[in-house]
Image (cartoon, rainbow, N blue to C red):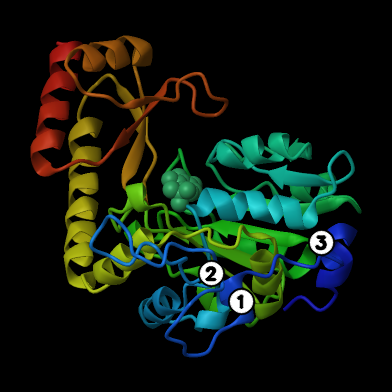
């Protein structure tokens, strides 16, 4: 529980007082047959679908469906044009440029820092420990009265491991800013989501996305789960029609295919464990971080040489070897069984 958290005092003053844009769809919500309120093309659209009409600004149908799947009430869900939009809106809601700061715990997802830089917000970096867990004492030391947000990615990108739940709860209970837990890879993890703790922690924001396990990266749909008060703030700031009609339609259809997605998740996890096992047999592989995600971080001999060799074979992985605490490592996404076989053969060929 966190009892000293005060959302209003955390918000930027201009956001607290903001009068949001009121769209035609906001001002009239009832039934009608002749819509002459939004300057749309009344004749239709060149496509089959009714794309001539503005989409639902609050994406109610999508949220109802997501609510069933996630077990989170629709009023606790915010949808963004990718999680990246939710991240940016959190900065704009809480961080006064040039005044406030946020805590990041590298090595982690790069977008938090880019978003901070775009918004001219100071980044305080507290490295993860060598086993990629939170350094709670150092985090406590970095927080001051202007610390508004703290980002934790779990399972973490690029390391793949989950952050200890007990440590995250310690921060949630003691930090009076917003704790953002990015669960982009939660579907591949054996641990349960923090969405089940929303009632307990008013300062909690959980991010998830349809870009990874759901296989919908191109549609751009990110989710933020939080208290209704925080959701109201995010909705106030977002562009009125941030999720387009095509995405809303296609996502509604995709969400009926939970079974197919769950099958892919199982297969991905099996393949991840197989890749881990096979790569560990190589003498040139020094360490593989146990992963709860759909990729593995592998520390090995001559990472740059292997990276270039693989690229020449048409196999593209991510070179993380120059990143602090990931020295000598490549990040490899789990592919189909055939792709993983191709990768393993190429790695063996390089070290032969
Ligand atoms: C891939 C990824 C995302 C996804 O962002 P979208 O904008 O939803 O595609 C978010 N967070 C992390 C840590 C990621 O790796």
Q: Secondary structure at mark 3?
A: helix
Q: Are marks 1 and 2 in contact (CB under 8 Å)?
A: yes
Left or right? Give the position of 327 relative to 91. Answer: left
Left or right? Give the position of 346 relative to 287. Answer: left
Image position, residue 311 (x, y; %): 25, 16
Q: Which mark is residue 18?
A: none
- Please indicate, yes or no, whether residue 156 appears anywhere in the rendered image: no
Q: Residues within 10 Å of mark 2 (few under 14, many from 20)?
A: some
In this picture, is 312 found above or below 200? above
Mark 1 and mark 2 lie on one chain; the one further toward the N terminus is 1
In this picture, is 71 found above or below 225? below
Q: Secondary structure at mark 2?
A: loop
How far apart, in angstroms, are the residues tagged by discs 1 and 2?
A: 8 Å
The residue located at (82%, 65%) in the rendering is 18
Q: Quadrant of the N terminus?
A: bottom right
In this rendered view, identify the residue nearer to me: 37 or 82. Answer: 37
Q: Residue furthest bottom?
A: 31
Q: Secondary structure at mark 1?
A: helix
Q: Which residue is mark 1?
A: 26
Left or right? Give the position of 81 relative to 90. Answer: left
Q: Which residue is mark 2?
A: 57
Figure quadrant of residue 287 = top left
Q: Which residue is mark 3?
A: 15
Image position, residue 140 (x, y; %): 80, 51
Between circles 1 and 2, the one closer to the viewer is 1
Between circles 2 and 3, the one closer to the viewer is 2
How far apart, in angstroms, are the residues tagged by discs 1 and 3?
A: 19 Å
């Amino acid at each position: 529980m966190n009892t000293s958290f005060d959302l209003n005092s955390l918000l930027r003053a201009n956001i607290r007082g903001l009068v949001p844009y009121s769209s035609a769809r906001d001002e009239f919500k009832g039934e009608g047959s002749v819509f002459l309120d939004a300057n749309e093309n009344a004749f239709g659209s060149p496509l089959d679908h009714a794309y001539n009409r503005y989409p639902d600004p609050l994406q109610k149908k999508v949220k109802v469906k997501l609510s069933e799947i996630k077990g989170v009430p629709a009023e606790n869900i915010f949808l963004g044009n990718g999680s990246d939009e939710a991240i940016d809106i959190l900065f704009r809601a809480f961080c006064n440029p040039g005044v406030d700061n946020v805590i990041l715990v590298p090595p982690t997802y790069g977008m938090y820092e880019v978003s901070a830089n775009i918004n001219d917000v100071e980044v305080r970096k507290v490295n993860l420990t060598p086993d990629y867990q939170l350094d709670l004492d150092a985090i406590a030391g970095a927080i001051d009265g202007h610390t508004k947000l703290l980002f934790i990615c779990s399972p973490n990108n690029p390391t793949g491991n989950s952050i200890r739940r007990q440590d995250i709860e310690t921060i949630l209970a003691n930090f009076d800013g917003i704790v953002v837990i990015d669960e982009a890879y939660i579907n591949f993890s054996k641990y349960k989501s923090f969405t089940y703790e929303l009632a307990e922690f008013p300062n909690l924001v959980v991010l998830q996305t349809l870009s990874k396990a759901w296989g919908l990266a191109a549609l751009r749909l990110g989710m933020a789960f939080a208290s209704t008060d925080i959701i109201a703030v995010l909705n106030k700031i977002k562009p009125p029609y941030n999720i387009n009609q095509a995405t809303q339609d296609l996502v509604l259809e995709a969400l009926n295919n939970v079974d197919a997605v769950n099958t892919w998740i199982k297969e991905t996890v099996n393949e991840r464990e197989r890749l881990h096992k096979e790569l560990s047999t190589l003498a040139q592989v020094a360490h593989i971080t146990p992963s709860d995600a759909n990729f593995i971080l592998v520390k090995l001999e001559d990472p740059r040489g292997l990276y270039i060799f693989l690229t020449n074979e048409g196999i593209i992985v991510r070179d993380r070897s120059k990143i602090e605490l990931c020295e000598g490592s490549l990040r490899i996404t789990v592919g189909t069984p055939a792709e993983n076989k191709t990768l393993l053969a190429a790695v063996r060929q390089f070290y032969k």
